[in-house]
Structures are given as structure tokens and as C-alpha cells.
Image: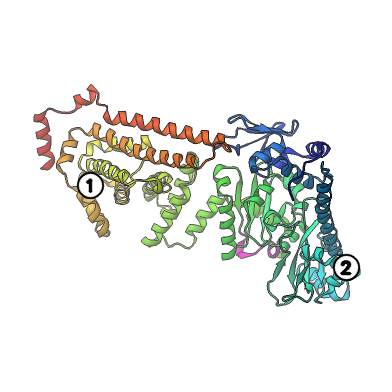
């Protein structure tokens, strides 16, 4: 159906009913600041919160890019959708009666809205049917299971509307279709019955299962989870995707937990239905569960609407499957976590227990104590990386180090990187103070290199590699053969925040840094001894140990060479970035995303400006620089001493 022309009264009612904070927080992580809310603007590459939402004015505005408007405009701009399409969705969401200017379209709209109302009605009636069956003779085993195996009170059973689906193939079908006379097509659309293969009628989707209703935020039943009471597989069976139920956008128990989440400023996510039910029964009410799938970014954003400090604790099972689920969940929200938009923690209960099992033998206060001690997601990931590693074995030590470097390289905050680099060095050195210092410097060097080089290889050209190899080789030869200028080279690299890119150069530099505290004048001999264990690498870097004619000339003008070589290395990085932003700009439709296009243009201009500055540095030779270069006689004397 074409999108209808909406009556002005409908538009006005939607504007009055809609909550802009409710709408925007589904897409932007918002923090309360006084009367308003702030966050990172979704309409440009915002680095610091410049996006403001005013619930009083029902208006949003970005102080950086100038985007602004009401909730309707936000959804139009964010999703590139039409006005009527957005208003229709908001009308359904806020239960506003829809009127159109065309009578024919009005009838079709009413039919669609009526469909949703009928589905809600069928699902609510089904929940009551299952509740009734639980307390009949046929549900005795299910009720006994809840009371004895799960130790649930009648109050909790009623609170979560737990029920039982009888074992017959058409028990619910007979009740809804034959007794209540609901159209079979509607019952199928509600996800309650399944057509038989090859035709010939329908059968109940849920049979001989303990039934757990799933509610939306308004407390309406939108689907079910069914737990088998026999050996039937799967153990848990969820409703299929329907007009009302999208499991990737729904959290079990959120309708009951959101008030406590807001009050305690923390949300806890567990794996199973009964983990939620057991924790709520114990008085821990800020708990929800994903619905048999990995926790999604949409679900996390839904949670963040209710916690001011954006605290979320993942309490998945401590077994291998639970660890993988936690890793997947962290991967989903990694961007938010690295930016600090979610304070993510991970709780693994001792002895591999899930919350329901833990509460069978422990108190609610014991669980709260575990929550309070749960580590931040990054600490937990580091623990996982090192948990089964034998750091006394070289290969496992190297694998662990590489994994940690990759993890820390994504941290955008320099202070946080420094903290974790120091912490990881302590863990890898197993408390050996002298080794900790070496490892800390080595990790810092590797992380610095990984932050750009690990993500930019696709923007590198063959010419870049040639320039890099020449510049890096110059610096390494000078470093190896000219001890007096080693500090100058280290300072130049740190000042520009660059590292060696060519793999064998980076490997050699790491070996140098590891030897740093023990370096004598005979650094080359020490390195050769160290690299005998790596014959392939030794063959690659061996030419750097020898002075060629060019390096012999470089020795007498080392400050100029260091400046030019490091400028060249930085220039190559800038050119990579420039090509990267140019590629993004070329793919952007300026008419649709003008702010984004303008941002890319600004980045391209900034990189080109920096490239010009670096070109000048490479070409510039001041009188003071020339004064440091010895005359010809001194040059040959230094050359002779160097070769001897």
C-alpha cells in the first residue's frame, strides 16, 4: 500500500504523545546533564558529546554540525525515511488513532491496526490458557518442577504468568479456532500453530512444555518461550518472528526490570529465562535476558535508556559456551565500550554456576557481592587471553602478547592505554620487576604501531613501501652504528608518534628495545647472538649491520637524516589517511549526507596541509643544520674511524 496522506489531527496527536528522549535513545547513548541529555551526534563523526536533547522543548540540536528538530525529523534524517512513514510508526507505537485524507486508505490502515490488536488479544488469551492448564491435572508435573526443582513460590509463578502447554497436537488449536472462533490465519500469524507439511491442517507449536510468556515494555504478551519437560529437543523453543515479536530487539524481563535498573543505575544481563526469574524472586530485580541469541547492539541500546551511568553487567555461564557468548556480546558493543559510552562488566560465577544454580545454595547478598566485584570487560578479556597460556613457553608467550597488543591497540584513550600496558606487562612478567619494565616498553611500542599500521594496509601503495624501507633502514643503520644519536632517534619517533612499519624492521626494533637496559657499545654483536634463534629474520636484517657508502655519508649529517627520514615516514602515513578519506568521500552522496561529505573534505584538506608541512621539513636545511656538518677533511676522518 502507498504511504497515505495523514490527517493533520493525527500528526498533531503524534507530536503531543511522542517522547523525544525515548525515540533518540534507541539510536544514541544519552547521558543526563541537568534538565537535558547529551551524547555523540549521529549525523557527523562526533568525537566529544555535542548533541543535546531537551525533553522540555521536545527538541534535539547538535552544537557542532547544526542538526536539529523534533522526534519526527530525527527519525526522518537518521533513517532516510518519509514524513508519513515515520508518523505512522510513531502512531502505532504511541497508540494514536490514525486518520487519513483518503477514505480508501483509511480502511486499509484500520485493517492493519486491527490485525495487531487481534494478535495481542490472541496472545493474551493463550497466556491465560497456559496458566489455567498449569494448575490442572495435566500440568501437575510442570507445577511440581517449578515448585521443587526451581523452588519458585506461587507469587513468582503468578508474577511471570508461567503456564503449561498440554501434550496434545491440537489442544490450543481446538481452543482458539474451534471454541473461540479466531481465524486460523491469525492464530498462525501469532506464531502459535504450524501448518502441516503437504497441507492437511495445523498442529500446536508448543506441546508438553513449561510456558514462559514474553512481554513488551507495556506488559503485553508478544511471544512465548517453552521449556521441554522430557528429552525432546530443542530444550528451549521460542516463538517465531511475528508482527509483534522480534527476538533481536526484545529483552526478557525488561518490562519488570526497567524501574529497578533506573533506580540502581545498573542493568544485569543473564542467559536464561529461569536466571531472570530466580534473581527477581530473590529481590534482585534489575535483571534481563536475551532470547536465545547473542546480545545485540539494539538490545544494549534499549538497556542504556534506563541507566544514567550506562552500567551493564554480563553474567553469562562460566563454561566455554558462556565465554563465547560474552565475547560475542562484547564484540557487538565494542565501539560503544571503547568510547566509554557503556560501562561494561563481566561476571563469571565461581565453579561455573549460572545465577539460578548459585542462588540454590547462596543468598541474594552473596550474588550482589559478586556483582560489585565483577571486572571491567577489558580486564575480563585480558584474563581470558592469559587463562590457559603457559607463559614459560615462547610460542604461547608470543601469541598472548600479540593478542594483548591487538586488544589494547583499539583503546582511543592514551591514559587508559598506559594503565593497561603497565598492567599487562606485570601479568606477562609474572611479577618480575626488571622484566616488567622491558615488557612495558615493548608493549607500548607494539601498541603504537598497531594503532595505525594494523588498520591501514589497504591504503598502502608500492611506492609507500619503497619510501618506508629506505627511511626506516636509514634510521636503523644510524641507530646501530652511531650510539651518540640513539636518543635523538628515539625522541624523533616518539615526538611524531610513529613506529617502524616494515615487518622485519619492526621485529629488529623490538629486539633492540628488549636489550635497551643491557646495551653496551657492541649492540650489533648482541643482536646477532639474539637472532641466531630466528635465522630467517637474521637474513632480512643482516644488511643493516653493515655500513654502506650512503650510511657512511649519513653519519656526518645524522640530525638532518633523522629529521628527513622520520618526516618521510609520517608523510607516508598521512598519504594513506588522505587516500582513505578520499575513498569515503567518493562513496558519499553529497545531496543526502552533506555534513558527512563536508567532514571528509575537511579531513582530506588537513592531511594535505600536513603533507605540505612535511615536504618542507624534508627540503628545509637551515644554517644551523649546515654548521653541524663537518668539512671534507673531518668527513673522511669520521668515515675512517667508522669503518675501523
Mark 1 residue element: helix
Which image quarter: residue 119?
Answer: bottom right
Q: Which mark is residue 374?
A: none
Q: Eyeballing the image, is 126 above or below 105?
A: below
Query: In the image, is residue 353 part of the stretch drawn in magenta?
Result: yes
Please name the residue that numbered disc 1 is placed on: 523
Residue at position x 78%, y 37% from top? 15
Q: Nearer the viewer, mark 2 or mark 1?
A: 2
In the rendered image, residue 166, in percent from the top left (x then y), is placed at 82, 74
In the rendered image, residue 393, in percent from the top left (x then y), is placed at 38, 62
Residue at position x 30%, y 50% from top? 511
Question: Which contiguous range is marked in magenta?
Answer: 348-359
| Prevailing SS of the magenta stretch | helix
Q: Which mark is residue 132?
A: 2
Closer to the camera in the image, 360 or 491:
491
Q: Earlier in the sequence, mark 2 or mark 1?
A: 2
Mark 2 residue element: helix
Query: Counting other residues with Cα less than 10 Å from the Cα at mark 2, is it few (<14), some (14-19), or many (20 or more)?
Result: some
Q: Eyeballing the image, is 257 above or below 618?
A: below
Amino acid at each position: 500500500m502507498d504511504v497515505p496522506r495523514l490527517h493533520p489531527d493525527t500528526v498533531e496527536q503524534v507530536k503531543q504523545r511522542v517522547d523525544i528522549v525515548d525515540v533518540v535513545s534507541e539510536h544514541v547513548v544519552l547521558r543526563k546533564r541537568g534538565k537535558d541529555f547529551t551524547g555523540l551526534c549521529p549525523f557527523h563523526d562526533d568525537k566529544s558529546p555535542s548533541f543535546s536533547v531537551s525533553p522540555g522543548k521536545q527538541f534535539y540540536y547538535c552544537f557542532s554540525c547544526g542538526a536539529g528538530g523534533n522526534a519526527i525529523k530525527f527519525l526522518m534524517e537518521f533513517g532516510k525515511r518519509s514524513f508519513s512513514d515515520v508518523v505512522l510508526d510513531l502512531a502505532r507505537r504511541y497508540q494514536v488513532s490514525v486518520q487519513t485524507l483518503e477514505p480508501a486508505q483509511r480502511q486499509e490502515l484500520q485493517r492493519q491496526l486491527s490485525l495487531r490488536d487481534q494478535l495481542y488479544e490472541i496472545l493474551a488469551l493463550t497466556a491465560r490458557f497456559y496458566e489455567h492448564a498449569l494448575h490442572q491435572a495435566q500440568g501437575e508435573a510442570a507445577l511440581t518442577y517449578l515448585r521443587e526443582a526451581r523452588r519458585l513460590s506461587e507469587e513468582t509463578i503468578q508474577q511471570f504468568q508461567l503456564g503449561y502447554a498440554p501434550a496434545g497436537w491440537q489442544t490450543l488449536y481446538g481452543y482458539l479456532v474451534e471454541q473461540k472462533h479466531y481465524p486460523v490465519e491469525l492464530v498462525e500469524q501469532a506464531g502459535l500453530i504450524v501448518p502441516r507439511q503437504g497441507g492437511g491442517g495445523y498442529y500446536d507449536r508448543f506441546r508438553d512444555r513449561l510456558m514462559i510468556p514474553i512481554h513488551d515494555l507495556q506488559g503485553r504478551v508478544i511471544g512465548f518461550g517453552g521449556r521441554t519437560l522430557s528429552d525432546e529437543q530443542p530444550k528451549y523453543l521460542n516463538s517465531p518472528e511475528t508482527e509483534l515479536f522480534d527476538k533481536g530487539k526484545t529483552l526478557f524481563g525488561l518490562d519488570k526490570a526497567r524501574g529497578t535498573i533506573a533506580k540502581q543505575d545498573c542493568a544485569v544481563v543473564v542467559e536464561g529465562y529461569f536466571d531472570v526469574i530466580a534473581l527477581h524472586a530473590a529481590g534482585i530485580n534489575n535483571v534481563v535476558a536475551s532470547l536465545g541469541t547473542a546480545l545485540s547492539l539494539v538490545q544494549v541500546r534499549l538497556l542504556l535508556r534506563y541507566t544514567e551511568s550506562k552500567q551493564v553487567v554480563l553474567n553469562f555461564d562460566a563454561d566455554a559456551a558462556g565465554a563465547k557468548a560474552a565475547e560475542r556480546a562484547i564484540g557487538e558493543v565494542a565501539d560503544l565500550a571503547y568510547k566509554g559510552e557503556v560501562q561494561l562488566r563481566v561476571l563469571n560465577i565461581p565453579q561455573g554456576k549460572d545465577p539460578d544454580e548459585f542462588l540454590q545454595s547462596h543468598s541474594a547478598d552473596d550474588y550482589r557481592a559478586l556483582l560489585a566485584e565483577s571486572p571491567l570487560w577489558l580486564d575480563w578479556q585480558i584474563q581470558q587471553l592469559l587463562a590457559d597460556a603457559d607463559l614459560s613457553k615462547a610460542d604461547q608467550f608470543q601469541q598472548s602478547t600479540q593478542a594483548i597488543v591487538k586488544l589494547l591497540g583499539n583503546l582511543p584513550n592514551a591514559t587508559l592505554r598506559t594503565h593497561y600496558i603497565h598492567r599487562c606487562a606485570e601479568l606477562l612478567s609474572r611479577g618480575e620487576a626488571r622484566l616488567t619494565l622491558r615488557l612495558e616498553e615493548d608493549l607500548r611500542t607494539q601498541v603504537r604501531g598497531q594503532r595505525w599500521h594494523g588498520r591501514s594496509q589497504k591504503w598502502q601503495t608500492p611506492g609507500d613501501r619503497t619510501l618506508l624501507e629506505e627511511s626506516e633502514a636509514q634510521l636503523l643503520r644510524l641507530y646501530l652504528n652511531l650510539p651518540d644519536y640513539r636518543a635523538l632517534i628515539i625522541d624523533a619517533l616518539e615526538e611524531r608518534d610513529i613506529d617502524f612499519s616494515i615487518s622485519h624492521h619492526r621485529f629488529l626494533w623490538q629486539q633492540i628495545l628488549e636489550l635497551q637496559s643491557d646495551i653496551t657499545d657492541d649492540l650489533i654483536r648482541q643482536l646477532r647472538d639474539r637472532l641466531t634463534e630466528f635465522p630467517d629474520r637474521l637474513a632480512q636484517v643482516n644488511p643493516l649491520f653493515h655500513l654502506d657508502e650512503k650510511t657512511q655519508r649519513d653519519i656526518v649529517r645524522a640530525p638532518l637524516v633523522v629529521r628527513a627520514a622520520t618526516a618521510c615516514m609520517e608523510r607516508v602515513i598521512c598519504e594513506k589517511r588522505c587516500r582513505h578519506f578520499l575513498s569515503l568521500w567518493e562513496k558519499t552522496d553529497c545531496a543526502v549526507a552533506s555534513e558527512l561529505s563536508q567532514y571528509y573534505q575537511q579531513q582530506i584538506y588537513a592531511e594535505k596541509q600536513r603533507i605540505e608541512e612535511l615536504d618542507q621539513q624534508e627540503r628545509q636545511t637551515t644554517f644551523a643544520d649546515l654548521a653541524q656538518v663537518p668539512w671534507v677533511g673531518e668527513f673522511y676522518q669520521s668515515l675512517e674511524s667508522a669503518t675501523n
